[in-house]
């Protein structure tokens, strides 16, 4: 079973993908992770990607597709979860070809639907313990004792530089502009399903399981 998880940054795709890997033995194919691994390993595709990335340019669809093809060949009969790809209609069509060449096809495309204002609030309020990484939130999960981590007792906390409102709204706008146009492509094939991404992790997981087990 090969599936795509869609949704804007912060919608929880990574969390749900990890659960599917653990519970169903699937393999998460994240373009960012695959690129970093290929560069680190110094593979031919990784070397091509490194030149482009070092120049501050976007890696071409051809390089990304070659990387996905390589990874599909490695996982053999295990199901794939595509995370971060496809982002455009051209990439969606390219993915169909990559799968067909290997006797595979997409079973489901699942979009985590979000309330954008609530998502901005969710992301911009995040912070974590600088020592152990325990997660917190300005409104939903503050440390029980001010300035003291509940887990390790540390007193230093940090926020991701890109967890600011301007960056989050820019990424949401980019998602709407580039990725949402591929939804009709999958809707026409009857494999697109929407899930309320604003629920708890367990609620979202249950909704995804219901789709995959249907």
Image: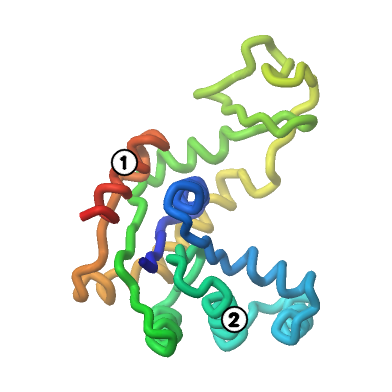
Picture residue at 41% right of the left edge, 82% below the top: 99
Residue closest to the eye, 168 or 143: 143
Q: Can you give x and y, in whole percent of width and height, for residue 68 in the image?
A: 55, 78
Gap in angstroms between the C-alphas marked 1 and 2: 32 Å
Q: Which residue is mark 1?
A: 206
Query: Could you tell me residue 40's position as x and y percent?
Result: 79, 70
Q: Is residue 93 visible?
A: no
The numbered mark, 1 or 2, whose residue comes first in the sequence reads 2
Q: Quadrant of residue 123?
A: top right
Viewer-proximal residue among 95 and 167 = 95
Q: Position of residue 36 (x, y in %)?
A: 71, 67
Dot 1: within a 10 Å radius of its alpha carbon, few (fewer than 14), some, or many (20 or more) residues? few
Q: Is residue 66 above or below residue 163?
A: below
Q: Quadrant of residue 66?
A: bottom right
Identify which residue is drawn at 70% across, 84% down: 45
- Is any part of residue 47 visible from this angle? yes
From the top left corner, tell me how far across and down residue 65 is, in percent: 54, 83
Considering the numbered disc 2 on the image, is that residue within a helix, a strand or a loop? helix
Farthest top residue?
145
Residue 14 is tagged as none
Q: Residue at x 52, y 61 (%)?
A: 28
Label 2 sits on residue: 70
């Amino acid at each position: 079973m090969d599936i795509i998880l869609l949704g804007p940054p912060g919608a929880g795709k990574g969390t749900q993908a990890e659960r599917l890997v653990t519970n169903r033995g699937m393999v998460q194919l994240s373009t960012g992770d695959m690129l970093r691994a290929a560069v680190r390993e110094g593979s031919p595709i990784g070397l091509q990607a490194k030149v482009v990335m070092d120049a501050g340019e976007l890696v071409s669809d051809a390089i990304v597709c070659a990387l996905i093809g390589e990874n599909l060949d490695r996982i053999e009969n295990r199901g794939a979860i595509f995370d971060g790809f496809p982002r455009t209609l051209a990439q969606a069509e390219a993915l169909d070809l990559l799968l067909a060449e290997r006797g595979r096809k997409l079973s489901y495309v699942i979009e985590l639907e979000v309330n954008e204002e609530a998502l901005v609030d969710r992301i911009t309020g995040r912070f974590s313990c600088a020592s152990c990484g325990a997660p917190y939130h300005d409104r939903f999960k503050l440390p029980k004792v001010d300035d003291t981590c509940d887990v390790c007792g540390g007193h230093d906390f940090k926020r991701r530089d890109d967890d600011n409102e301007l960056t989050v709204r820019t990424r949401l706008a980019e998602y709407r502009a580039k990725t949402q146009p591929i939804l009709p492509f999958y809707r026409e094939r009857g494999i697109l399903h929407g899930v309320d991404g604003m629920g708890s992790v367990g609620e979202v997981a249950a909704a995804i399981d219901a789709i995959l087990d249907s």
